[in-house]
Amino acid sequence: MRRTSSGLWVPGAGPPPDDAPYAGAPAGDNPGEAGDDAENGDSLDARLAKAEAEAQEHRQSWLRVLADFENVRRRSAIELGDARDRGRSEVLLPLLGILDDVDRALAAGGVDSAGRAGGSGAVAGDEATDPIRTGLRLIRARLGDLLRTQGVEEIAAAGEPFDPHVHEAVMQIAAPGVPPGHVAQVLSPGYRLGERVLRPAGVAVAQDSSPNPA
């Protein structure tokens, strides 16, 4: 190349200027670039490994929080159910006392809760037509229906083996035909609400009547 009088370089004879690029050298053929690529690759792998470790740590933390939440939710549900049952028990227990009073009133007139005559000096025809007894039987029936709709059940007692969880032994009596340790007589009915005992049954337990060996 040669330089004109105006200072421009034009094709022609002569060496190229010092700042002209060498055509034989490929672009980017720099010995330092390969080392930079390797370092960048190592740095990328390190960042990826660190990100995976952090993600695993966050996942474990999330699982622990989820397990704690499930435990709290389960305990809350149990406590809420217990509180609800306790509240219902406080309302239903007085109704059991009223039911006992009605049963005693019917028994005093010689009529049981089903309207059957049975007391001393009771006359079946008179009891059946007595408006007071009729009203008591209706009240008793409505109370029983109300308790049943609330899930209250009478505890089986007569003839059953004595169970201290649901029976309260008031006395022991000789009861021929009833195995010892079984309920011979129900003195006051017991009731349960689901698995919760509202009131144990007051019972008389049959005692062992076998003669003692001489």
Image (cartoon, rainbow, N blue to C red):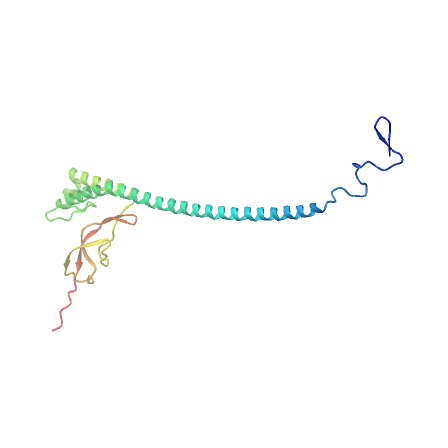
Judge from the rendering whether residue 187 lies leftward or rightward of residue 86; answer left or right. left
Answer above or below: position of 92 versus 166: above
Answer above or below: position of 150 versus 10: below
Pick whichever, 29 or 108, lies toward us: 29
Residue extending farthest left: 121
Residue 206 at x, y = what percent?
Answer: 17, 60
| Residue 7 lies in quadrant | top right
Pick whichever, 31 or 137, lies toward us: 31
Residue at figure coordinates x 25%, y 43% from the top left: 89
Residue 135 at x, y = what percent?
Answer: 19, 38
Residue 20 at x, y = what percent?
Answer: 80, 37
Pick whichever, 198 or 39, lies toward us: 39
Residue 63 at x, y = what percent?
Answer: 46, 47
Answer above or below: position of 92 versus 10: below
**The C terminus - image quarter:** bottom left
Q: Can residue 93 be seen in this view?
A: yes
Residue at figure coordinates x 66%, y 48% from the top left: 38
| Residue 159 lies in quadrant | bottom left
**The N terminus - image quarter:** top right
Q: Is residue 145 visible?
A: no
| Residue 164 lies in quadrant | bottom left
